[in-house]
Amino acid sequence: MAYDVNLTLTVYLDEVWPEVEALEDVCQRPQHARQTRSITLPASGAWGDWIDGELRQTVRPHIWYFALSDCEHELNSIMHRLRFEFRARQEGGSEFSIEMAGMLLANVVFLMAIALLIWRFSIQTVAFHRSTGSVHPVIWGLSSAILIQLLAQSLHTAHLCRYSFDGSGVKALEVLSEILFMMSQVTQTSLLILIALGYTLLQSKIGELDLMIPMCFMVGIIHIMLVGFGKIKDDASYKFHENEGVVGWILMSVRLLLYAWFLWAVQSSAAEGGTRLRQFLSQFRVAGSIYFLSYPFIFLATKCFAPYWQHTVMSVGLMVMQTGSNLWLGSLFLTRGEYFRVSTLSSSELPGGTKFGIVKEE
Protein backbone atom coordinates (compact mmCIF):
# COMPACT_ATOMS: atom_id res chain seq x y z
CA MET A 1 0.00 0.00 0.00
CA ALA A 2 1.20 3.52 -0.74
CA TYR A 3 -0.25 4.99 2.44
CA ASP A 4 -1.85 4.01 5.77
CA VAL A 5 -5.45 2.80 5.50
CA ASN A 6 -8.24 3.19 8.07
CA LEU A 7 -10.73 0.32 8.42
CA THR A 8 -13.80 0.02 10.61
CA LEU A 9 -14.04 -2.71 13.25
CA THR A 10 -17.62 -3.46 14.27
CA VAL A 11 -18.91 -5.76 17.03
CA TYR A 12 -22.31 -7.47 16.82
CA LEU A 13 -24.45 -9.45 19.23
CA ASP A 14 -25.55 -12.94 18.19
CA GLU A 15 -29.20 -11.87 18.33
CA VAL A 16 -28.77 -9.49 15.38
CA TRP A 17 -26.04 -11.32 13.46
CA PRO A 18 -28.39 -13.22 11.07
CA GLU A 19 -30.05 -9.90 10.18
CA VAL A 20 -26.66 -8.28 9.70
CA GLU A 21 -25.44 -11.05 7.39
CA ALA A 22 -28.64 -10.75 5.34
CA LEU A 23 -27.85 -7.11 4.46
CA GLU A 24 -26.30 -7.00 0.98
CA ASP A 25 -24.89 -3.51 1.52
CA VAL A 26 -22.10 -4.08 4.04
CA CYS A 27 -21.96 -0.36 4.77
CA GLN A 28 -25.43 -0.55 6.33
CA ARG A 29 -24.33 -3.18 8.81
CA PRO A 30 -22.53 -0.89 11.33
CA GLN A 31 -25.86 0.62 12.35
CA HIS A 32 -26.60 -2.69 14.16
CA ALA A 33 -23.20 -2.80 15.90
CA ARG A 34 -22.77 -2.64 19.67
CA GLN A 35 -19.31 -1.10 19.27
CA THR A 36 -17.41 0.53 16.43
CA ARG A 37 -13.67 1.17 16.33
CA SER A 38 -11.25 2.54 13.74
CA ILE A 39 -8.21 0.42 12.85
CA THR A 40 -5.16 1.71 10.98
CA LEU A 41 -3.29 -0.58 8.60
CA PRO A 42 0.32 0.58 8.24
CA ALA A 43 1.42 1.01 4.62
CA SER A 44 4.59 -0.95 5.40
CA GLY A 45 2.58 -4.09 6.13
CA ALA A 46 3.86 -4.26 9.72
CA TRP A 47 1.63 -5.10 12.67
CA GLY A 48 -0.54 -2.20 13.82
CA ASP A 49 -1.07 -1.01 17.38
CA TRP A 50 -3.08 -3.08 19.81
CA ILE A 51 -6.71 -2.00 20.28
CA ASP A 52 -8.15 -2.67 23.73
CA GLY A 53 -11.80 -2.72 24.72
CA GLU A 54 -14.47 -4.35 26.88
CA LEU A 55 -17.78 -5.99 26.12
CA ARG A 56 -20.44 -6.55 28.75
CA GLN A 57 -23.81 -8.28 28.70
CA THR A 58 -25.62 -9.14 31.93
CA VAL A 59 -28.89 -10.76 30.78
CA ARG A 60 -27.37 -14.05 29.54
CA PRO A 61 -24.22 -15.32 27.79
CA HIS A 62 -23.87 -14.32 24.14
CA ILE A 63 -21.72 -15.00 21.11
CA TRP A 64 -20.03 -11.82 19.84
CA TYR A 65 -19.10 -11.30 16.20
CA PHE A 66 -16.27 -9.04 15.01
CA ALA A 67 -16.11 -7.71 11.44
CA LEU A 68 -13.87 -5.40 9.41
CA SER A 69 -15.21 -3.15 6.66
CA ASP A 70 -13.83 -0.59 4.20
CA CYS A 71 -16.81 1.60 3.39
CA GLU A 72 -14.52 4.50 2.48
CA HIS A 73 -12.91 2.37 -0.25
CA GLU A 74 -9.41 3.23 0.91
CA LEU A 75 -8.16 -0.15 -0.30
CA ASN A 76 -9.20 0.80 -3.85
CA SER A 77 -11.13 -2.46 -4.37
CA ILE A 78 -7.88 -4.44 -4.56
CA MET A 79 -7.81 -7.91 -3.03
CA HIS A 80 -5.86 -7.91 0.25
CA ARG A 81 -5.11 -10.61 2.77
CA LEU A 82 -5.13 -9.45 6.39
CA ARG A 83 -3.48 -11.15 9.34
CA PHE A 84 -4.83 -10.48 12.80
CA GLU A 85 -4.27 -11.56 16.37
CA PHE A 86 -7.22 -11.60 18.73
CA ARG A 87 -7.03 -12.06 22.50
CA ALA A 88 -10.02 -12.19 24.82
CA ARG A 89 -10.58 -13.04 28.47
CA GLN A 90 -13.68 -13.45 30.58
CA GLU A 91 -14.45 -10.92 33.30
CA GLY A 92 -12.86 -13.20 35.88
CA GLY A 93 -9.68 -13.57 33.84
CA SER A 94 -10.45 -17.00 32.36
CA GLU A 95 -9.02 -17.72 28.89
CA PHE A 96 -11.96 -19.99 28.07
CA SER A 97 -14.90 -18.60 26.13
CA ILE A 98 -18.35 -19.20 27.57
CA GLU A 99 -19.01 -22.22 25.32
CA MET A 100 -15.82 -23.88 26.62
CA ALA A 101 -16.42 -23.15 30.29
CA GLY A 102 -16.02 -26.35 32.30
CA MET A 103 -14.54 -28.34 29.40
CA LEU A 104 -11.16 -28.78 31.08
CA LEU A 105 -12.82 -30.36 34.13
CA ALA A 106 -15.05 -32.52 31.91
CA ASN A 107 -12.05 -33.81 29.96
CA VAL A 108 -10.10 -34.57 33.13
CA VAL A 109 -13.08 -36.54 34.50
CA PHE A 110 -13.43 -38.55 31.29
CA LEU A 111 -9.67 -39.14 31.16
CA MET A 112 -9.83 -40.64 34.66
CA ALA A 113 -12.87 -42.69 33.66
CA ILE A 114 -11.04 -44.14 30.64
CA ALA A 115 -8.00 -44.92 32.80
CA LEU A 116 -10.26 -46.81 35.24
CA LEU A 117 -11.92 -48.57 32.32
CA ILE A 118 -8.53 -49.73 31.01
CA TRP A 119 -7.57 -50.99 34.49
CA ARG A 120 -10.82 -52.96 34.75
CA PHE A 121 -10.51 -54.18 31.15
CA SER A 122 -6.95 -55.39 31.78
CA ILE A 123 -8.01 -57.40 34.82
CA GLN A 124 -10.88 -58.99 32.88
CA THR A 125 -8.59 -59.76 29.92
CA VAL A 126 -6.04 -61.51 32.15
CA ALA A 127 -8.83 -63.54 33.75
CA PHE A 128 -10.22 -64.41 30.32
CA HIS A 129 -6.78 -65.56 29.15
CA ARG A 130 -6.36 -67.78 32.20
CA SER A 131 -9.79 -69.28 31.60
CA THR A 132 -9.56 -69.90 27.84
CA GLY A 133 -5.81 -70.05 27.26
CA SER A 134 -5.81 -67.25 24.67
CA VAL A 135 -7.01 -63.72 23.91
CA HIS A 136 -9.27 -63.47 20.88
CA PRO A 137 -8.52 -60.90 18.10
CA VAL A 138 -11.80 -59.04 18.79
CA ILE A 139 -10.53 -58.36 22.31
CA TRP A 140 -7.24 -57.07 20.90
CA GLY A 141 -9.24 -54.88 18.52
CA LEU A 142 -11.29 -53.42 21.35
CA SER A 143 -8.10 -52.90 23.38
CA SER A 144 -6.70 -50.86 20.50
CA ALA A 145 -9.85 -48.71 20.34
CA ILE A 146 -9.74 -48.00 24.08
CA LEU A 147 -6.00 -47.19 24.08
CA ILE A 148 -6.46 -44.86 21.09
CA GLN A 149 -9.27 -43.11 22.96
CA LEU A 150 -7.05 -42.80 26.04
CA LEU A 151 -4.28 -41.21 23.97
CA ALA A 152 -6.76 -38.87 22.25
CA GLN A 153 -8.24 -37.81 25.59
CA SER A 154 -4.79 -37.27 27.09
CA LEU A 155 -3.65 -35.06 24.21
CA HIS A 156 -6.84 -33.00 24.25
CA THR A 157 -6.63 -32.53 28.03
CA ALA A 158 -3.01 -31.39 27.67
CA HIS A 159 -4.11 -28.92 24.98
CA LEU A 160 -6.83 -27.52 27.26
CA CYS A 161 -4.39 -27.23 30.18
CA ARG A 162 -2.07 -25.13 28.02
CA TYR A 163 -5.07 -23.17 26.70
CA SER A 164 -6.05 -22.21 30.24
CA PHE A 165 -2.73 -20.34 30.56
CA ASP A 166 -2.18 -18.70 27.17
CA GLY A 167 -5.58 -18.77 25.44
CA SER A 168 -4.26 -20.65 22.40
CA GLY A 169 -3.12 -24.09 23.56
CA VAL A 170 -1.16 -26.42 21.29
CA LYS A 171 -2.86 -26.72 17.91
CA ALA A 172 -0.97 -29.88 16.95
CA LEU A 173 -2.23 -31.66 20.07
CA GLU A 174 -5.80 -30.57 19.38
CA VAL A 175 -5.76 -31.78 15.76
CA LEU A 176 -4.02 -35.06 16.61
CA SER A 177 -6.46 -35.76 19.44
CA GLU A 178 -9.44 -35.30 17.14
CA ILE A 179 -7.92 -37.62 14.52
CA LEU A 180 -7.25 -40.29 17.16
CA PHE A 181 -10.74 -39.90 18.58
CA MET A 182 -12.16 -40.52 15.09
CA MET A 183 -9.89 -43.56 14.65
CA SER A 184 -11.15 -45.01 17.91
CA GLN A 185 -14.73 -44.69 16.65
CA VAL A 186 -13.82 -46.23 13.28
CA THR A 187 -12.21 -49.20 15.09
CA GLN A 188 -15.36 -49.77 17.14
CA THR A 189 -17.55 -49.46 14.06
CA SER A 190 -15.42 -51.99 12.19
CA LEU A 191 -15.67 -54.49 15.05
CA LEU A 192 -19.45 -54.21 15.13
CA ILE A 193 -19.80 -54.70 11.37
CA LEU A 194 -17.33 -57.63 11.37
CA ILE A 195 -19.34 -59.42 14.06
CA ALA A 196 -22.58 -58.61 12.26
CA LEU A 197 -21.12 -60.18 9.08
CA GLY A 198 -20.56 -63.40 11.02
CA TYR A 199 -17.00 -63.17 12.27
CA THR A 200 -16.76 -65.27 15.48
CA LEU A 201 -20.39 -66.33 14.91
CA LEU A 202 -20.44 -68.19 11.58
CA GLN A 203 -16.69 -68.47 11.08
CA SER A 204 -13.72 -68.39 13.40
CA LYS A 205 -11.35 -66.60 11.04
CA ILE A 206 -11.64 -63.55 8.79
CA GLY A 207 -11.66 -65.60 5.58
CA GLU A 208 -13.55 -63.78 2.84
CA LEU A 209 -14.21 -60.95 5.28
CA ASP A 210 -10.64 -59.71 4.68
CA LEU A 211 -12.27 -57.30 2.21
CA MET A 212 -13.38 -55.42 5.32
CA ILE A 213 -9.80 -54.33 6.03
CA PRO A 214 -9.40 -51.97 3.02
CA MET A 215 -13.00 -50.82 3.49
CA CYS A 216 -12.30 -49.83 7.10
CA PHE A 217 -9.07 -48.18 6.00
CA MET A 218 -10.97 -46.05 3.49
CA VAL A 219 -13.56 -45.10 6.12
CA GLY A 220 -10.71 -44.04 8.41
CA ILE A 221 -9.14 -41.90 5.67
CA ILE A 222 -12.48 -40.20 5.03
CA HIS A 223 -12.81 -39.36 8.73
CA ILE A 224 -9.25 -37.95 8.86
CA MET A 225 -9.94 -35.79 5.80
CA LEU A 226 -13.12 -34.47 7.39
CA VAL A 227 -11.21 -33.53 10.56
CA GLY A 228 -8.66 -31.63 8.45
CA PHE A 229 -11.35 -29.84 6.46
CA GLY A 230 -13.15 -28.93 9.67
CA LYS A 231 -9.97 -27.38 11.07
CA ILE A 232 -9.66 -25.15 8.01
CA LYS A 233 -13.11 -23.77 8.87
CA ASP A 234 -12.38 -23.25 12.58
CA ASP A 235 -12.89 -19.46 12.41
CA ALA A 236 -16.15 -19.60 10.42
CA SER A 237 -18.90 -17.46 11.94
CA TYR A 238 -21.41 -20.34 11.80
CA LYS A 239 -19.20 -22.85 13.65
CA PHE A 240 -20.08 -23.42 17.32
CA HIS A 241 -18.56 -26.92 17.70
CA GLU A 242 -16.04 -29.14 15.90
CA ASN A 243 -18.60 -30.93 13.72
CA GLU A 244 -20.60 -27.87 12.71
CA GLY A 245 -21.58 -27.26 9.10
CA VAL A 246 -21.01 -29.50 6.09
CA VAL A 247 -18.46 -31.67 7.96
CA GLY A 248 -21.07 -32.69 10.51
CA TRP A 249 -23.65 -33.49 7.84
CA ILE A 250 -21.16 -35.63 5.91
CA LEU A 251 -20.18 -37.47 9.08
CA MET A 252 -23.83 -38.12 9.86
CA SER A 253 -24.40 -39.43 6.33
CA VAL A 254 -21.38 -41.76 6.61
CA ARG A 255 -22.62 -43.08 9.96
CA LEU A 256 -26.09 -43.74 8.54
CA LEU A 257 -24.57 -45.60 5.56
CA LEU A 258 -22.48 -47.71 7.95
CA TYR A 259 -25.61 -48.33 10.00
CA ALA A 260 -27.45 -49.57 6.91
CA TRP A 261 -24.52 -51.92 6.22
CA PHE A 262 -24.66 -53.13 9.82
CA LEU A 263 -28.39 -53.89 9.61
CA TRP A 264 -27.93 -55.76 6.33
CA ALA A 265 -25.06 -57.78 7.81
CA VAL A 266 -27.06 -58.73 10.90
CA GLN A 267 -29.99 -59.82 8.74
CA SER A 268 -27.75 -61.92 6.48
CA SER A 269 -26.04 -63.65 9.41
CA ALA A 270 -29.34 -64.32 11.14
CA ALA A 271 -30.63 -66.04 7.99
CA GLU A 272 -27.68 -68.48 8.12
CA GLY A 273 -27.71 -69.22 11.84
CA GLY A 274 -29.88 -71.20 14.19
CA THR A 275 -32.49 -70.08 16.69
CA ARG A 276 -30.00 -69.30 19.43
CA LEU A 277 -27.83 -67.22 17.10
CA ARG A 278 -30.87 -65.31 15.80
CA GLN A 279 -31.87 -64.47 19.36
CA PHE A 280 -28.42 -63.08 20.08
CA LEU A 281 -28.33 -61.12 16.82
CA SER A 282 -31.70 -59.59 17.66
CA GLN A 283 -30.23 -58.19 20.90
CA PHE A 284 -26.99 -57.26 19.10
CA ARG A 285 -28.99 -55.32 16.48
CA VAL A 286 -30.67 -53.21 19.17
CA ALA A 287 -27.42 -52.39 20.99
CA GLY A 288 -25.58 -51.71 17.73
CA SER A 289 -28.41 -49.46 16.54
CA ILE A 290 -28.06 -47.35 19.68
CA TYR A 291 -24.36 -46.92 18.92
CA PHE A 292 -24.73 -46.09 15.22
CA LEU A 293 -27.63 -43.70 15.78
CA SER A 294 -26.09 -41.94 18.77
CA TYR A 295 -23.96 -39.59 16.64
CA PRO A 296 -26.86 -38.47 14.39
CA PHE A 297 -29.01 -37.99 17.51
CA ILE A 298 -26.33 -35.95 19.34
CA PHE A 299 -25.59 -33.91 16.19
CA LEU A 300 -29.25 -33.02 15.60
CA ALA A 301 -30.13 -32.56 19.29
CA THR A 302 -27.21 -30.12 19.70
CA LYS A 303 -28.90 -27.72 17.28
CA CYS A 304 -31.81 -27.36 19.72
CA PHE A 305 -29.54 -25.66 22.27
CA ALA A 306 -28.36 -22.05 22.37
CA PRO A 307 -25.09 -21.48 20.46
CA TYR A 308 -23.02 -21.08 23.63
CA TRP A 309 -24.20 -24.53 24.86
CA GLN A 310 -23.63 -26.44 21.63
CA HIS A 311 -19.91 -27.11 22.06
CA THR A 312 -20.43 -28.56 25.54
CA VAL A 313 -23.41 -30.71 24.51
CA MET A 314 -21.60 -32.07 21.45
CA SER A 315 -18.27 -32.75 23.18
CA VAL A 316 -19.71 -34.35 26.31
CA GLY A 317 -22.22 -36.32 24.25
CA LEU A 318 -19.48 -37.83 22.06
CA MET A 319 -17.32 -38.68 25.07
CA VAL A 320 -20.26 -40.41 26.76
CA MET A 321 -21.05 -42.28 23.52
CA GLN A 322 -17.50 -43.52 23.08
CA THR A 323 -16.96 -44.49 26.71
CA GLY A 324 -20.35 -46.18 26.95
CA SER A 325 -19.74 -48.25 23.83
CA ASN A 326 -16.35 -49.36 25.21
CA LEU A 327 -18.05 -50.50 28.41
CA TRP A 328 -20.68 -52.42 26.46
CA LEU A 329 -18.20 -54.11 24.12
CA GLY A 330 -15.91 -54.97 27.03
CA SER A 331 -18.80 -56.63 28.83
CA LEU A 332 -19.84 -58.40 25.61
CA PHE A 333 -16.39 -59.85 24.88
CA LEU A 334 -15.10 -60.63 28.38
CA THR A 335 -18.08 -62.09 30.20
CA ARG A 336 -19.59 -65.52 29.69
CA GLY A 337 -22.85 -64.15 28.37
CA GLU A 338 -24.88 -64.99 25.29
CA TYR A 339 -22.17 -63.81 22.88
CA PHE A 340 -19.59 -66.05 24.55
CA ARG A 341 -21.91 -69.05 24.23
CA VAL A 342 -22.77 -68.59 20.54
CA SER A 343 -19.34 -67.41 19.32
CA THR A 344 -15.94 -69.00 18.77
CA LEU A 345 -14.67 -67.33 21.94
CA SER A 346 -15.87 -70.41 23.83
CA SER A 347 -14.48 -72.94 21.34
CA SER A 348 -12.14 -75.61 22.61
CA GLU A 349 -8.44 -75.15 21.94
CA LEU A 350 -7.95 -78.91 21.57
CA PRO A 351 -7.11 -80.18 18.07
CA GLY A 352 -10.33 -80.52 16.13
CA GLY A 353 -12.31 -78.82 18.86
CA THR A 354 -15.26 -76.89 17.52
CA LYS A 355 -18.83 -75.86 18.22
CA PHE A 356 -22.08 -76.85 16.63
CA GLY A 357 -23.02 -74.34 13.95
CA ILE A 358 -19.53 -72.81 13.71
CA VAL A 359 -17.42 -73.24 10.59
CA LYS A 360 -13.70 -73.07 11.42
CA GLU A 361 -11.96 -71.73 8.33
CA GLU A 362 -8.26 -72.45 8.26
Image: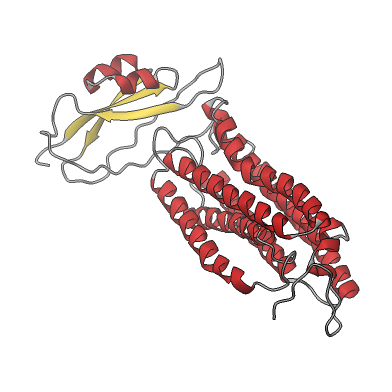
Picture coordinates of residue 112, whole percent (x, y): 74, 52
Asked if residue 109 shows in the view, the reply is no
Splitting the image into 4 quarters, where does residue 200 fall? bottom right
Colour style of the rendered protein structure: secondary structure
Q: Residue at x 81, y 51 (%)?
A: 279
Q: Residue at x 60, y 42 (%)?
A: 295
Q: Is residue 269 left or right of residue 350?
A: left
Q: Residue at x 41, y 50 (%)?
A: 229
Q: Where 346 falls versus 247 (above or below)? A: below
Picture coordinates of residue 153, whole percent (x, y): 63, 54
- Comparing 100 with 334, the one in front is 334
Q: Residue furthest right?
A: 131
Splitting the image into 4 quarters, where does residue 270 fall? bottom right
Q: Where 109 falls versus 173 (above or below)? A: above
The quadrant the N terminus occupies is: top left
Q: Residue at x 51, y 34 (%)?
A: 89
The quadrant the C terminus occupies is: bottom right
Q: Is residue 215 left or right of residue 103?
A: left
- Comparing 220 with 174, the one in front is 220
Picture coordinates of residue 343, whole percent (x, y): 79, 65
Splitting the image into 4 quarters, where does residue 353 fall? bottom right
Q: Where 235 falls versus 116 (above or below)? A: above
- Comparing 310 with 56, the one in front is 310
Q: Is residue 167 left or right of residue 334?
A: left
Picture coordinates of residue 214, whole percent (x, y): 51, 67
Q: Is residue 171 left or right of residue 194?
A: left
Asked if residue 3 shows in the view, the reply is yes
Q: How many marks?
A: 0
